[in-house]
């Protein structure tokens, strides 16, 4: 189900009349659209399936190992499917599981040097294509968009939501 928000520039619509529900719907739809855009720019031929490419690309954006549940959530995958995906990538030497420093029950996933090489060689061009989406923004609009997105992140952190800090990818 698609939800659109009113254009604040439309007659009878002011910026003050856009409410939190409309913004939340816009973020939800934007997240879906961005995932589809990124998937459309990924190599899908050969052994690089969309889930594999998405996981490798996601790990390239992390500055530290990530939890399988966090990765699975961002991919929309069940824990079982994440396990199968990580098992396959681990057998190929592209990722490795590492223990969490404070909780032995949690296994984190990180790229191996070989995984970084594959991600750079095969996914680098697709990341550039995905990032080209923002070429339609002026430099000023990109600065403002980043500022606002960082503010949303700050608000979530202030409400107790665990998120990467601004300096983490």
Image (cartoon, rainbow, N blue to C red):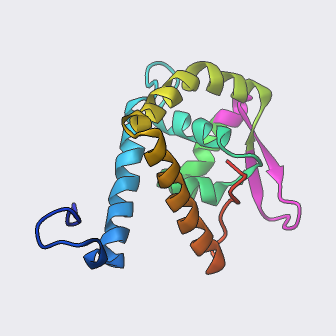
**How many numbered marks appear?**
0
In the current view of this chain or complex, which residue is farthest to the right?
Answer: 101
Does residue 65 appear to the left or right of 134 in the view shown? Answer: right
Q: Which residue is pictured at 62% across the width and 69% down the height? A: 154
Position of residue 126 measured from the top left corner of the image (x, y, whole percent): 49, 26
Residue 99 picture location, percent across and down: 84, 55
**Residue drawn at 55 percent across, 57 percent down:** 147
**Residue 90 is a magenta residue:** yes
Name the foreground residue: 141 vs 92. Answer: 141
Considering the image in quadrants, where does the N terminus appear? bottom left
Image quadrant where residue 15 sits: bottom left
Q: Is residue 165 magenta?
A: no
Q: Front-most of 104 and 24? A: 24
Q: Name the residue located 45 percent from the left edge and 27 percent from the top edge.
A: 129
Q: Residue at x 48, y 34 (%)?
A: 131
Residue farthest toward the left in the current orientation of the protein: 11
Q: Give the magenta part as a residue range.
A: 89-109
Q: Is residue 69 above or below residue 54?
A: below
Left or right: residue 168 versus residue 10 is right
Between residue 23 and residue 40, name the one nearer to us: 23
Tell me if I can see residue 160 in this picture. Answer: no
Question: Does residue 96 appear anywhere in the picture?
Answer: yes
Instruction: Name the side, left or right, on which 98 lies relative to 71.
Output: right
Quadrant housing residue 155 = bottom right
Is 67 placed above or below 15 here? above
Q: Position of residue 139 (x, y in %)?
A: 48, 40
């Amino acid at each position: 189900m698609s939800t659109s928000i009113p254009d604040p520039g439309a007659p009878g619509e002011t910026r003050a009349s856009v409410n939190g529900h409309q913004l939340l719907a816009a973020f939800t739809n934007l997240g879906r659209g961005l995932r589809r855009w990124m998937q459309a720019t990924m190599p899908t031929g050969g052994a690089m399936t969309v889930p594999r490419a998405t996981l490798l690309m996601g790990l390239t954006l992390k500055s530290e190992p990530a939890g399988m549940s966090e990765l699975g959530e961002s991919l929309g995958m069940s824990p079982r499917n994440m396990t199968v995906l990580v098992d396959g990538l681990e057998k190929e030497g592209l990722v490795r599981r590492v223990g969490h420093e404070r909780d032995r029950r949690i296994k984190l996933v990180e790229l191996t040097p070989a995984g970084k090489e594959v991600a750079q060689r095969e996914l680098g061009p697709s990341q550039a294509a995905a990032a080209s989406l923002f070429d339609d923004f002026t430099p000023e609009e990109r600065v403002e968009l980043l500022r606002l997105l960082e503010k949303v992140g700050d608000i979530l952190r202030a409400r107790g939501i665990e998120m990467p800090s601004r300096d983490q990818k």
